[in-house]
Amino acid sequence: MRIFLAGATGVIGIRLLPLMLAEGHAIAAMTRTPAKIDGLRAIGVTPVLCDLFDKTSLTAAVKDFRPDLVVHQVTDLPDRIEELAAFLPRNNRVRSEGTANLLSAARAASASGFLAQSIAWRSGPGTGPVLDAHENGVISAGGTVLRYGQFYGPKTFYEYDPPVAPRIHVDEAALRTMPFLAGPRGTFNITDEDVAQ
């Protein structure tokens, strides 16, 4: 399968890449950070330097790769949870404008599948109308929404102590994402508390 992975160097995207490669997928790995391009090329993927909010360039990049599946793992979150509140407007823009741009690019490229990350908790920071619209847009386009629990493990907000439920170890989250690349469409929880369907 040809997969366009947006958010390839994020906390879960970077874990998906080796799993996707091990299954023999051809991957275009999108990042907005020029310094990460060589590292992506070195592991055997096609690096794509692009900004999610540059709709014209994004559409051209997706069309050029001709993916079967577009995977949306982009977030705009801080390294430290103490800074989360300040980043929420930026992350909301990823979920609104960014998701719309990726869906449009996927349609333009005639991609048959679209998978996007979301969150398993339905109240508190990061929830509300923007999140609902993000999920509804993906489902309306015939895509799949994966609602992850709060990540814990290396390079997450909770490196050493798991957070309250819903939660999922980030390595386990990546493993449990893989069946959905060609799997059912709809909305699914990916948490320690839920069994993958």
Image (cartoon, grey):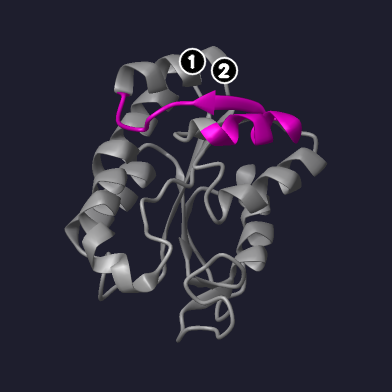
Q: Which residues are magenta?
A: 35-54
Quadrant position of residue 42? top right
Say whether residue 113 is magenta. Answer: no
Q: Position of residue 188 (x, y in %)?
A: 49, 62
State how far apart marks 2 and 1 are (Cα).
Answer: 5 Å
Task: From the viewer's side, name the closer residue of 4 and 43.
Answer: 43
Residue at (59, 82) in percent of width and height: 160
Image quarter (top left, top right, bottom left or bottom right) of the C terminus: bottom right
Residue beneath the point at 69% across and 28% down: 41
Relative to 86, residue 50 above or below: above
Residue 122's tag is: none
* Mark 2 surroundings: few (<14), some (14-19) or many (≥20) residues within 10 A: some
Counting from the top left corner in percent of width and height, residue 129 is at 18, 58
Measured as percent of width and height from the top left, residue 104 is found at: 34, 26
Would you say 98 lies left or right of 65 here?
Answer: left
Q: Which residue is mark 1?
A: 63
Residue 34 visible? The answer is: yes
Amino acid type, callout 2:
Arg
- When the figure is inspected, residue 9 is found, relative to residue 5, above or below; the finding is below
- Identify the residue at image location x=43%, y=46%: 74
User: In which quadrant is the N terminus drawn?
Assistant: top right
Q: Is residue 4 visible?
A: no
Relative to residue 195, is residue 99 drawn left or right? left
Q: Which structural element holds mark 2?
A: loop
- Viewer-nearest residue: 158 or 3: 158
Q: Are marks 2 and 1 in contact (CB under 8 Å)?
A: yes
CA neighbours of label 1 inside 10 A, class few (<14), some (14 to 19), many (20+)? some
Residue wearing tag 2: 66
Q: Amino acid at mark 1?
A: Lys
Q: Position of residue 120 (x, y in %)?
A: 41, 69
The local secondary structure at tag 1 comes to helix
Magenta includes 45?
yes
